[in-house]
Image: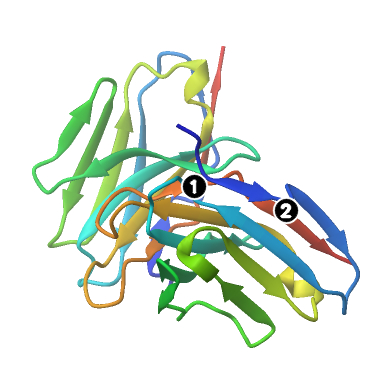
Amino acid sequence: RKEVEQDPGPFNVPEGATVAFNCTYSNSASQSFFWYRQDCRKEPKLLMSVYSSGNEDGRFTAQLNRASQYISLLIRDSKLSDSATYLCVVKRSGGSNYKLTFGKGTLLTVNP
Amino acid sequence: EAGVTQFPSHSVIEKGQTVTLRCDPISGHDNLYWYRRVMGKEIKFLLHFVKESKQDESGMPNNRFLAERTGGTYSTLKVQPAELEDSGVYFCASSQDPYYEQFFGPGTRLTVL
């Protein structure tokens, strides 16, 4: 079983739609959780960290459920510029282990 | 402030040859990480330097891969001899502290023929 599993996608949505990404992780020792965004042939960039209480940044809302080891990202009122691959990422911190563990990513295309 | 830079951006080599990738982290970042993405797979961790020391090299696939960070500034990743399955995109990232955000470079796209 992969350590981080995401919806395989791809997602094609019209502008203005609401789209949700789901992710599960297998290692209960994971301590930090993130959504990264990767544009085509570019590097991954941090979109937002995910906290247990849930957090929002403009049109983006992230949720974490530690009991079910589930992470989500909701994008409201999607824009053409939101088209990208969204990567679910977890991290165990401590000892010598600070690596990021990535899901395969879900490709989102927002259409005019 | 300059971001993480990587050189070359692309490299095409034949099986059995040697390739050296370079990463320059953000100035002042003691933590440097190497990751790679092979086609169809997720991005995977290779190793983590703190200054010039290897903190975690659990992701290095085999002894054909050698990473160095002499002087604690830039890092090199050498693949010798390269195999077909080494093809992919190699990303470098750096962070000021291991608990802080890791900033990624643009990657080196390696093709082994």
Disc 1 target residue: B104
Outermost bottom residue: B63
Location of the C terminus of chain B (image quadrant)? bottom right
Tag 1 subunit: B
Label count reads 2
Percent x, y of residue A77: 35, 16
Tell me if I can see residue B69 in this picture.
no
Name which residue lies at 23% across and 57% down: A32
Image coordinates of residue B86 in percent, x first then y, are 72, 71
Q: Please, which chain is the residue tagged with disc 2 on?
A: B
Residue B91 position, x and y percent, is 57, 55
Name the quadrant of the N terminus of chain B.
top left
**Picture quadrant of residue A78:** top left
Against A92, residue A84 (above or below) is above
Q: Is residue B75 left or right of residue B100?
A: right
Query: What is the C-alpha distance between the residues marked 2 and 1?
Result: 14 Å
| Residue type marked 1 | Phe
Which residue is pictured at 53% across the width and 33% down the height?
A84
Residue at mark 2: B109
> Judging from the image, what secondary structure is the residue with disc 2 in?
strand
